[in-house]
Image (cartoon, coloured by chain):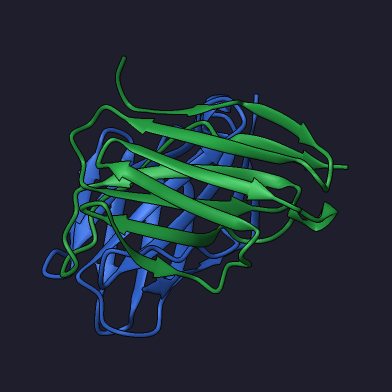
Amino acid sequence: ETGVTQTPRHLVMGMTNKKSLKCEQHLGHNAMYWYKQSAKKPLELMFVYNFKEQTENNSVPSRFSPECPNSSHLFLHLHTLQPEDSALYLCASSRGDRGQTYEQYFGPGTRLTVT
Amino acid sequence: SQQGEEDPQALSIQEGENATMNCSYKTSINNLQWYRQNSGRGLVHLILIRSNEREKHSGRLRVTLDTSKKSSSLLITASRAADTASYFCVGGSNYKLTFGKGTLLTVNP
């Protein structure tokens, strides 16, 4: 399988639930990203991992907890979410290098609904 | 990171026509990238132009970059209904990308 995959594609969860989103890339990249896309708002960068180290946390609430066990996998652990957290969550990967910006390859996203 | 500001916000054309979208950014960049997002194929990288390049082609796409004016343009020639999507420009100055609101292109059959 090639590219960037995300599971699940759709998720409905209550505010007291705990769930995790998974992202996997098969491109040999060293940087991985989580983005949030809400209706009528620009894509928002949440977290960046470069060579498995978190290099960016864009003031994301602690109810979102990322995990990057290796360069190919990225998780987003969710707990005690709010209805306003309902959005499309996109994962992306790219070559890793702090000094350059490379093209990013995006997964299909997880459509999250918090009830 | 650089947030691009795309213009126009929405564009509607007939199939076969050319579509031009513009972008402005505020500070120095290493490269500028264009992305497309539609419901069928998600968010996809289209083309990257380096700061020392002025023009680049890829298939039906033509991108220009004017670093003195901090602006870029994306031309799609002979548009197709499948080109209907939102288009985003993103200036790259480190490993982060910051997306703007994009241009919504509608190609009518």
Q: Nearer the viewer, residue A87 or B107?
A: A87
Asked which quadrant contains residue B65, the reply is: bottom left
Residue at image position (68%, 35%) is: A111
Q: Is residue B103 left or right of residue B92?
A: right
Q: Nearer the viewer, residue A36 or B33?
A: A36
> What chain is the blue one?
B
Q: Does A12 appear above or below B99? A: above
| Quadrant of the image containing the C terminus of chain B | top right
Q: Is residue A112 left or right of residue A51?
A: right
Farthest-out residue, right: A115
Q: Where residue A79 sits in the image (x, y, percent)?
A: 69, 50
> What chain is the green one?
A
Residue at image position (21%, 47%) is: A30
Farthest-out residue, top: A1
Whether residue A86 is visible to the viewer of this picture, yes or no, is yes
Q: Nearer the viewer, residue A85 or A20?
A: A20
Q: Is residue A85 left or right of residue A66?
A: right
Q: Is residue A43 left or right of residue A28?
A: right
Asked which quadrant contains residue A96, the reply is: bottom left
Q: Does A93 appear above or below A8? A: below
Whether residue B103 is visible to the viewer of this picture, yes or no, is no
Residue at image position (31%, 14%) is: A1
Farthest-out residue, left: B52
| Quadrant of the image containing the N terminus of chain B | bottom left
Q: Where residue A12 sits in the image (x, y, percent)?
A: 78, 33
